[in-house]
Amino acid sequence: MQISKTASLTNYLLPVYRKKIAHPAFIILPGGGYTYVSLRESAPIAHALNALGYQAFVLDYTTWEKDRNLTFQMLQEEVRKTIEYIVENADMLRVDPDQIYLMGFSAGGHLAAISGSLFYKYIKKVVLAYPYLSPKYNQDVSLEILGEGKEALHNLFNIDASDYISKNTPPTFIWGTYEDNVVALQAMLDYIRRCDATNIPVEFHLYEKGSHGLSLATEATMVEDEQVNPHVASWMLLLNAWLKL
């Protein structure tokens, strides 16, 4: 369904075996550097969550390729409309409105982190996979390096997700890899420290090996052989156990 002129939502719903059963649900925000939406972090993630008993919704949000004048306000409005759609149609979608989770990858993790804090009334927990969180340690997001005409991306990347943390920020699950040379480990650690200082529960998993953008880290999402990492692939099972705490 269309969320806006440049954003759409795809539902990945579980088969109906019993009437009136309501499942927990995930809103998935794929990565792509706000330039595009990664297919490797879309349908495969939704199917993996379905296999664990979750309804899944992938938001193909507005990116720079679709609108070179995009703003963070536009993205927040798309997330808000997505949440409203799920809550208002919870019965039809067989969703438990009290168990809606938000998951983001890379740049989508940036959007998810901030959205979780802004829409805390509806989001029970937030999941951040190798998230971009702060411009403080990522020098490659300068306007000079991004290139001419990419002011919108520059403005997005200069928003620090830590600034949105409050006492209402939902419990958060974060994972990344030590070898990731795209997003800064220190930014994740700073985010965790800020959560701790605000008494927000956090679970953090740092894997030693693995490049940026591993997605499921299985054959299902591989483009290159090094994107298959059985150790990193454990993150989905660790997440499922955490969600049930």
Image: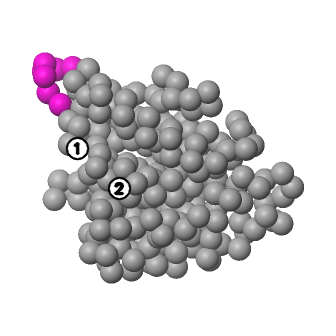
Q: Which of the 4 image quadrants contains residue 40?
A: top right
Asked if one can make out residue 234 in the rendered structure from this viewpoint, the answer is no
Residue beneath label 2, please? 126
Q: Where 129 sits versus 93, above or below?
A: below
Q: SS for tag 2?
A: strand
Q: Kindly report the secondary structure that dominates the magenta region of the rendered protein.
A: loop
Q: Earlier in the sequence, mark 1 or mark 2?
A: 1
Question: Is 19 inside the magenta-drawn segment?
Answer: yes
Number of marks present in the image shown: 2
Viewer-proximal residue, 194 or 222?
Answer: 194
Instruction: Give the residue type at disc 1.
Output: Gln
The crowding category of the residue bearing disc 1, from other C-alpha atoms within 10 Å (few below 14, some 14 to 19, many at least 20), is: some
Asked if one can make out residue 25 in the rendered structure from this viewpoint, the answer is yes
Viewer-proximal residue, 176 or 226?
Answer: 176
Q: Quadrant of the C terminus?
A: bottom left
How far from the left and from the top, in percent, is residue 160? Answer: 55, 68
In the image, what residue occupies the spot 55% across and 44% down?
A: 75
Region in magenta: 15-22
Rounded to the nearest angstrom, the CA distance separating label 1 from label 2 is 11 Å
Residue beneath label 1, please? 99
Instruction: Give the residue type at disc 2.
Output: Val
Viewer-proximal residue, 77 or 196?
Answer: 77
How far from the left and from the top, in percent, is residue 130? Answer: 50, 62
In the image: residue 87, left or right of residue 179: left
How far from the left and from the top, in percent, is residue 31? Answer: 56, 49
Q: SS for tag 1?
A: strand
In the image: residue 54, left or right of residue 218: left
In the image, what residue occupies the spot 52% across and 58% down?
A: 110
Coloring scheme of the render? one colour
How far from the left and from the top, in percent, is residue 189? Answer: 45, 78
The crowding category of the residue bearing disc 2, from other C-alpha atoms within 10 Å (few below 14, some 14 to 19, many at least 20), is: many
